Amino acid sequence: MNKPKILLTRRWPEAAEVRLKELFDVCLNLDDQPLSTGQLQEALGQYDAVLPTVTDAFTAEVFNAEPLRTKILANFGVGYNHIDLEAAKARGITVTNTPDVLTDCTADIAFGLLLAVARRIGEGERIVRAGQWKGWRPNQMLGSKVTGKTLGIIGFGRIGQAMAKRAHFGFDMPVIYYTPHPPSPALCAQFGASPRDSIEAVLQEADFVSLHCPGSKANRHLINAERLALMKPSAYLINTARGDVVESEALVQALKNQTIAGAGLDVYEGEPNLHPDFLELNNAVLVPHFGSATTETRIAMAMRVIDNLIAFFNGEEPGDKVI
Ligand code: DGY
């Protein structure tokens, strides 16, 4: 029997590409550039499976492709807001993702951003590299203490809980959270985390607010000017979820006017073309959507995609089936 034809839309770590090639008839995107709408449509006509990432916008328009050969989109990533699930379902296409394996690394980056913005690490590094450091002094670059401060988490799934664990065990931080789907009280008790009944309540009380909700139409601009105005002037916002969960213009204004103290951002509306004013703001720490970017995790994500494909082509239900 012929091996299923697979398109990898971006390059993967070598070990994972090798395993994929042993199992399937694989086409690589050698340039590693994001594919256009037209190229994604062509792919749906030519391959049994397409393995996309967050940079591939599988819109309703893309799913209008004719002819249609693809039976599964096995996404390399946990978030799937770049895939129009209704349109995929209407064309009979299965969608899978890669949960669990990136939880710790994403929480690490969220906590790293929290420390970096509170302790002005990005700013400090820029000063040293620019040769502008004139030596130690008591008032040099005072930031905010982290230990003991209250962490507010919006979205308390796997990554939100991993963030809570770091804050509770590592930094003695009281943790509060809002989530529409609360986990069991026993689980929350492990991290000393207590629920609040609204996003507003978390924003008003927290010294650090970390976003861990999924990207979706419903969560677009969840954090807008009105909600940013509820945060303390001494509070910081951390976003490792999806860029459009935060209204960029509103955040830029809050940072410029110092109605909040700072922000640590891994994701951006319209990335990689972020709002240009972020670049001018010293109270923002900016990193390039690399929450899951460790060798171990990226290989684990790829292996998870491969396991989903093996199950699917064996006629079984993939472990990480979204639809
Ligand atoms: C994820 O896994 O969702 C990362 O943000 C990359 O897509």
Image (spheres, rainbow, N blue to C red):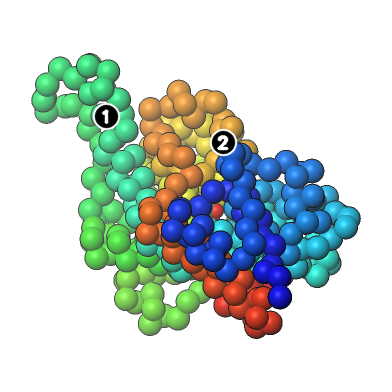
Mark 2 / mark 1, whichever is N-terminal? 1
Q: Are marks 2 and 1 in contact (CB under 8 Å)?
A: no
Secondary structure beneath dot 2 equals loop
The answer to whether 320 appears left or right of 1 in the picture is left
> Residue 219, image x and y in percent?
63, 55
Kindly indicate the quadrant of the structure image that contains residue 273: top right
Q: Which mark is residue 272?
A: 2
In this view of the protein, can residue 241 be seen by the observer? Answer: no
Amino acid identity at mark 2: Pro
In this view of the protein, can residue 16 be seen by the observer? Answer: yes
Q: Is mark 1 within 8 Å of ligand 1?
A: no
Disc 1: which residue:
125
> Residue 165, image x and y in percent?
32, 66
Is the residue marked by circle 2 packed among few (<14), some (14-19), or many (20+) residues within 10 Å? few
Secondary structure beneath dot 1 equals helix
> Residue 127, image x and y in percent?
26, 22
Task: Name the residue located 67 percent from the left edge and 76 percent from the top edge.
Answer: 313
